[in-house]
Image: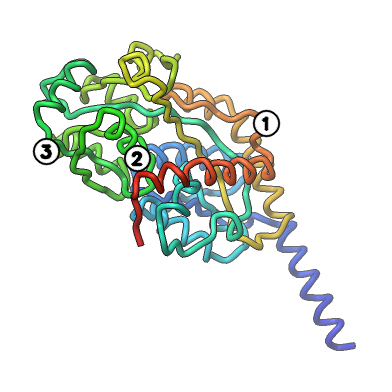
Amino acid sequence: MKRLMTAMLAGLATSAALAEYPDKPITIVVPFAAGGPTDKVARDLGVAIGAALKQTVIIENVGGAGGTLGAAKVAKASPDGYTLLLAHIGMSTAPALYRKLPYNVETDFEYLGMVNDVPMTLIGRPTLPANSYPELVKWLQENKGKINLANAGLGAASHLCGLLFQQSIQIDMTTVPYKGTGPAMTDLLGGQVDIMCDQTTNTTSQIESGKVKAYAVTTMTPLKTPALSKLPTLDSQGLKGFNVSIWHGMYAPKGTPAAVTEKLNAALRAALKDADFIKKQEALGAVVVTDARLAPAEHKKFVAAEIAKWAPAIKAAGQYAD
Ligand code: ASP
């Protein structure tokens, strides 16, 4: 009898806690350094989600190892809805790239819904002599063996895009990995590295203010965002079919109660309808996902398909890390 009472009381306490969720600040882990493209999405999204949940949202940057350190931290966090992850396409490439990934992308997370699609741009240091994509190709050919390509580590979007670019033009470059393309951008601006392929959520303002050389967008059609609309596609400049666009999704540790994940999904839906969030995303070249892709089941199906899509390309490229 005493045991039954204790169990009932514990049950009541749990449902009371769920009913009150969230009653303290929520942390969204960004698996890259501050000031980069995923960080920028997370900070605006955090404001919109915080408004929907009437709670403070804190962004924690856990960069390194192409985003896998931050994802591992969330996979192992308490499944109480107070530690979440905002991650990009790297979630689907890490299983093929890392031999000893400390988490299982498909079974260690609750999927909360997708967020946006973000195109990428090919940019160069301000002092690079090339002023157009054809001039860049000429410069790359003339400087073989001396070119530094920045990225955010194995599995980062900048790594994947840079890898495809090197394969397409058949010029090998020295890759310089950072904890995120935020710090990589600082070095590119300072001339320590030559080129980088990075999301528009990090490059738009630098392109707009003429602080970096911008050569191309990585999508099949030019972008509508005014600051980027004049940039030609790589496809139209000789790299037929070159098409890299990344996506973000939100995750909670496996075992987070359904009552909590449902609240989080509802908050994400509200955030993606927030006019201010949509405007900020569009100004940075990103497109907020449609309602259908906000369903956790669709999100999970999409990531599984992406894992299957990337694995053969990664195996063919022979890129692995422990
Ligand atoms: N998202 C970037 C990348 O994958 C890294 C970052 O957000 O800093 O390269």
Q: Which mark is residue 239?
A: none
Residue ID at (54%, 55%): 105
**Mark closer to the chain start, 1 or 3:** 3
Q: Position of residue 48 (x, y in %)?
A: 56, 37
Relative to 257, is 212 on the left or the right? Answer: left
Of residue 79 and residue 216, the one placed in the foreground of this image is 216
Kindly identify which residue carries mark 1.
291
Q: Is mark 1 within 8 Å of ligand 1?
A: no
Q: Is residue 91 visible?
A: yes
The crowd level at tag 1 (other Cα within 10 Å; few <14, some 14-19, many 20+) is few
Q: Quadrant of the N terminus?
A: bottom right
Q: Which mark is residue 145?
A: 3
Give, as a three-letter code, the residue at label 1: Asp
Relative to 273, is 15 on the left or the right? Answer: right
Snapshot quadrant of residue 181: top left
- SS class of the residue under badge 1? helix
Marks 2, 3: nearer the viewer = 3
Of residue 172 and residue 37, the one placed in the foreground of this image is 172
Of residue 73 and residue 260, the one placed in the foreground of this image is 73
Location of residue 1 with respect to 106 vertically, above or below: below
Mark 2 and mark 3 in contact? Answer it, CB < 8 Å. no
Q: Is mark 2 within 8 Å of ligand 1?
A: yes
Give, as a three-letter code, the residue at label 3: Gly
Residue ID at (39%, 52%): 61
Kindly identify which residue carries mark 2.
36
Q: Position of residue 129 (x, y in %)?
A: 10, 21
Residue ID at (36%, 22%): 217
Cα separation, mark 2 vs mark 3, equals 28 Å
